[in-house]
Amino acid sequence: MNMNSLKGEHVHKRNAVCILGTGDFGRSLGMRLIKAGYPVIFGSRNPKNSALLPGGAEVFTHADALKRSQIIFLAVHRENYDFLQPLCDLFDGKVLVDVSNNLKINQYRESNAAYLSQLVPKAIVVKGFNTVSAWALQSGNLDANSQVFVCGEDGEAKHLVMDIARSIGLTPLDQGSLLAANEVENYPLQLFPMWRLPFIITAGLTILIYLYCVLIDLIYSYVIRGTENSYRLLISIPNHVFPTVSLILLGLVYLPGVMAALLQLYRGTKYKRFPNWLDRWMLCRKQLGLVALAFAFLHVFYTLIIPIRYSYRWWLTNHIAAEAQKNTTSSEMSKLSAWRGDLYYAIGILGFFLFLLLGITSFPSIANSMNWREFRFVQSKLGHVTLLLSAGHAAVYGWDRFLKTSKYKWGLPPSFMLSLVIPCIVLALKLILITPCVDRMVTRIRQGWERKLKSGNDRV
Ligand SMILES: NC(=O)C1=CN([C@@H]2O[C@H](COP(=O)(O)OP(=O)(O)OC[C@H]3O[C@@H](n4cnc5c(N)ncnc54)[C@H](OP(=O)(O)O)[C@@H]3O)[C@@H](O)[C@H]2O)C=CC1
Ligand SMILES: [Fe+3]
């Protein structure tokens, strides 16, 4: 037995794949397919100009290339699809993969794939690969872009395309019929879809609280006392806004969870869809949490630089000089103030540490290394403890400032109250939900419903 026949026995022979269009995407896809062992045939308007094509590929005219393969990738922009019409008969029964993207969301009335299937009715059109960039294919950096959304009317054709995706290291996901093509074509055009709502909430809260602080801290004290504090715009006020927004956002991360549990209790079942707004809210909890963590980070940095600020050093030197002049020292240190100060720092540091832990465990690579129970434990139990510590930190700080500075008597409490309202509601509701009798009731509702489902199934 010679070597060639031995090879022939063991190497699985792959079917030839045709790619129409020798642009960026066509070439990159061709290179990956050749590496995976597929014979690749390019169809081009200009078959002689093949210098840039990956080694091992063959180039023909469109018609000749079509005749040589059962599966065709169309790597041409939608505006240029017209050239396919005269070739229509050559597509009879073949799988035609539409990889195209548009420049704008819903740019055309019908999806590119639907348009293609009208243009070439004899082909079996499958939509896919449009979310993978030419650059990712070429550089092999497929980790972040590894999902390929596939949709089409013909199950067998979809399987063929999904097999190809798998063999070049991608993860295919069946999105259903060609009606889903519109949505699939919009995916790469969406700008951080999950971040939009958290971004709007954060921007709104930050602006409102900042303006409120400017009103109280600058305008109010200027009008009433004539003191000009405009330097506070850059550090003092932001360092009041960041923790406030962070705490509200952290409250908003855990609020939908307790609301959903209460809704299940009220409805007496967990087998019913949540209202859309609650669904959307639940889906962006991770993003809300990460923004809250970023703001907590800013608060930490802004707090750490306080001792090197000019205004603070000036106050300290002045204070010492004044006492030296009077030849006195401050009366004995207030032990209670020292306790309060240390308490809010200690709670703050612990809360921030747990918050960091929550952030780290929400990253996919770490989350994937935990089972469901471990993930729930960290995100739910530790999350509520973080909320409790952060709210405690804010409350003790607010209390301390309230006692120390009279100007905040009516200024500080409202903004601090605001930051504490949502966390307090969440913690109170959580406490109710975990009290044994309510917990038992929730379990009973679930069991009752499961029994009902089971007897329904038995009858069927
Ligand atoms: N670039 C990317 O990262 C991605 C691209 N896509 C999609 O892939 C498709 C191709 O994109 P890309 O490769 O970047 O584009 P390019 O402009 O680089 O290439 C397009 C190719 O289409 C062919 N072509 C151009 N005009 C005509 C015409 N009038 N008639 C027939 N063929 C024509 C040409 O090939 P030839 O000269 O050989 O005929 C050309 O090289 C697009 O639909 C795009 O949306 C999808 C995902 C990612
Ligand atoms: Fe703080």
Image (cartoon, rainbow, N blue to C red):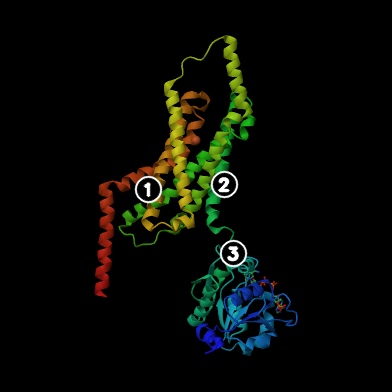
x, y (%) of residue 308?
Answer: 61, 30
Residue 347, located in which quarter of the rendered image?
top left
Residue identified by numbered label 1: 381
Q: Is residue 396 left or right of residue 124?
A: left
User: Of helix, strand and loop, which one carries label 3?
Assistant: loop
Residue identified by numbered label 2: 203
Residue 164, located in which quarter of the rendered image?
bottom right
Instruction: Note whether ligand 2 is within 8 Å of mark 2.
Output: no
Q: Which numbered disc, 3 or 1, marks the residue closer to the eye?
A: 3
At x 28%, y 59%, the residue is 446
Q: Identify residue type, mark 1.
A: Lys
Q: Which numbered disc, 1 or 2, marks the residue closer to the eye?
A: 1
Q: In this view, does 360 lie to the left or right of 257?
A: right
Residue identified by numbered label 3: 141
User: Of helix, strand and loop, which one carries label 2?
Assistant: helix
x, y (%) of residue 10?
Answer: 50, 83
Q: Height in image: 8 above or below 382?
A: below
User: Of helix, strand and loop, which one carries label 1?
Assistant: helix
Task: Find residue 12 and name its label.
Answer: none
Camera-nearest residue between 120 and 379: 379
